[in-house]
Image: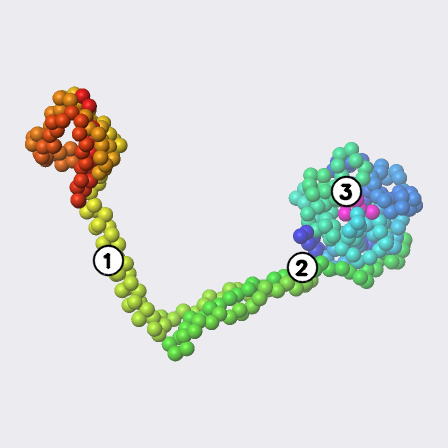
Amino acid sequence: MNHPIARAAEPEFASTGFYTFHNDNDKDNTLFSGLFRDAGGNVSMAKAEVTSSSENWQLYYQQGRYFIRNYDYHGEYQLGLTAESLRIPRLYKRSGALGQQWSLNRKGDGKYTFTNGLLGNDSALALRKGSLIPTMQTSLSDASWDLVSNPNAGAPSQQDAAMMTDVEDFEIEEVPSSSTAVVSFPLPSRTPASTISGSLTSATTTTPTQTTNNTESSAPSLPSTSSSLVPGAIPGIVVGVVLLGALIGLLGYFLGGARRKPKAGADEKNPYTAETAAMQSSNGHTTYYTHYGQIQQQSQIGYRPLTNQAANPRNGQPQEDAPRYEAESIQVQQQHPEKHLPSYTTYK
């Protein structure tokens, strides 16, 4: 949204005289509107004090804004913009439309900028170097103007009495204003009715107002507080404490069980898995284990049984002698009611 242009509290320029407009980028020229209306309302820059009377402009003050009227076009036309032509100003049939309202802002160096009511402060009348056509630009680098009074042009009232009258349909910007939405949730009191209710105290509204009106907004109100406990809150707290204690007990039980469980070491691996599929004995014999509880063919040549001093690979304790075999080839079936041990075949 464009920011509305400022309104002058008092007129800085006399509506009873004429002025010439000069831009810093073209100080030898001045703004004019052709010879005796032959330009059809278009404006441009021309040589100062040489061309025609149309280089003289009236700044008519009304309600904090200026209407810019031309010497040749009298009070019938005014400089302005339209919604269809927002970039290049020209002379239009007189009206109080925003596009024909101008604000003149004095700069620190004594120069002025022209802003239009239709565009607001987002742009200003400017003249680029080398150009003769003034346009609305967002940059202020080319928007500095000198306004020089020209008493030789006489008084506007001598040209047309309408140049000294106000416009009847003066347009004012509509600026939306909004109020703050406040939502309050009162806390329950000590009365038996402990239902929390929420009420919407005000809703956001947007209403068009004039720029002369003040925008009001309501400040958010905080919900009131009470130091009393809600009835029924104490039993709820007790139940919560009990549940929390039970949860802590369960957590401690599971954590204690995890600590008591020993880690599996390298010496507790199952000797009957594939990792121990092949073992080399001290006498050069190699034992190959087969499936649990099956009848297998076993050959023995130069077999030396284990002794009582042989260590159990699992716990390091002495174990019993393995069965001795006299025949070279027998069938053996290892049966264990509680734990099946693998049958094996030994080769030299």
Between the residue at mark 3 and the residue at mark 2, the CA separation in whole angstroms equals: 26 Å
Magenta stretch in the rendered image: 86-90
Residue at 82%, 42% (x, y): give it.
31
Q: Earlier in the sequence, mark 2 or mark 1?
A: 2
In which quarter of the view is residue 66 placed? bottom right
Secondary structure of residue under mark 2: strand
Tell which of 236 and 290 is nearer to you: 290
Secondary structure of residue under mark 3: strand
Q: Nearer the viewer, mark 3 or mark 2?
A: 2
Query: What residue is shown with label 3?
Result: 135
Residue reaching furthest to the left = 308
Q: How is the image coloured?
A: rainbow
Query: What residue is shown with label 2?
Result: 175
Q: Earlier in the sequence, mark 3 or mark 2?
A: 3
Q: Nearer the viewer, mark 2 or mark 1?
A: 1
Rate crowding at label 1 as few (under 14), some (14 to 19) or many (20 or more) other CA atoms within 10 Å.
Answer: few
What amino acid type is highlighted by mark number 2? Val
Tell which of 306 and 270 is nearer to you: 306
Secondary structure of residue under mark 1: helix
Between the residue at mark 2 and the residue at mark 1, the CA separation in whole angstroms equals: 66 Å
Q: Which mark is residue 249?
A: 1
What amino acid type is highlighted by mark number 3? Thr
Instruction: Tell me if label 3 and label 1 are in contact, CB under 8 Å.
Output: no
